[in-house]
Amino acid sequence: MTDRRTDLRYLVSVAVHAWNSNMDFFHGHTRNISGSGVYIIGKTKIKPHDRLVFLMALPGLLADEKATPVWAFCRVMRVEPHDSGDGTVGIAAVVEEYEMPTYGPGTGIAPPQPAANPLLNARSPFGGRLK
């Protein structure tokens, strides 16, 4: 099998707060990240072609730089059993869009809002992106 990836992958392990297509929440962490994809390890029921959205805080490049929170809207390409034996899986996903979150009053980080982005609608916090 030929590797079709063109973006450089970075071995970065950061915590993610994720939702699958059924809006089931799960915690996980990244194993690697690129400009067009991500590999996440987490305990969830998900299959190829499902949608996935997650929030992560990318570490700053400099010692005094704050972490940058980022939403990622993805399509799952591959799911692999993880060697932990507890239902944890490895999820390879194509990132269709990265987005910097807005800050809501008193909430810290809020998901993207329909009024700010025409790709969203009001049916869920993530609009039509998980379909």
Image (cartoon, grey):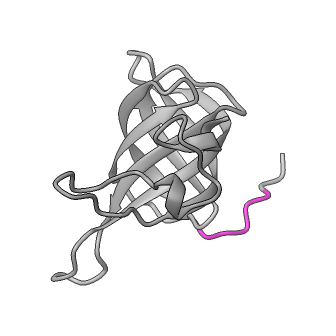
Give the percent coordinates (x, y) of residue 52: 56, 39
Which SS does the magenta portion mostly show?
loop
- State the residue in front, 74 or 110: 110
The residue stretch that appears in magenta: 4-9
Image position, residue 84 (x, y; %): 38, 23
Residue 33 lies, with reference to residue 81, above or below; the image says below
Question: Is residue 55 found left or right of 104 in the rendered image?
Answer: right
The quadrant the C terminus occupies is top right
Is 106 or 47 nearer to us in this picture? 106
Query: Which residue appears farthest toward the top when viewing the image?
Result: 86
Residue 28's quadrant in the figure?
top left
Picture residue at 53% right of the left edge, 41% below the top: 122
- The answer to whether residue 6 is magenta is yes
Note whether 42 is above or below 60 in the view shown.
Answer: above
Q: Position of residue 37 (x, y in %)?
A: 61, 56
Relative side of 83 to 118, left or right: left
- Residue 1 located left or right of residue 17: right
Q: Residue at x 58, y 24 (%)?
A: 46
- In this rendering, the count of numbered labels is 0
Say which residue appears at 52% left-offset and 59% top-offset.
115
Q: Quadrant of the N terminus?
A: top right
Q: What is the x, y in percent for residue 56? A: 36, 54
Q: Quadrant of residue 49?
A: top right
Q: Residue at x 56, y 64 (%)?
A: 34
In the depicted structure, whether residue 112 falls above or below residue 91: below
- Residue found farthest to the right: 1
43 falls in the magenta region = no
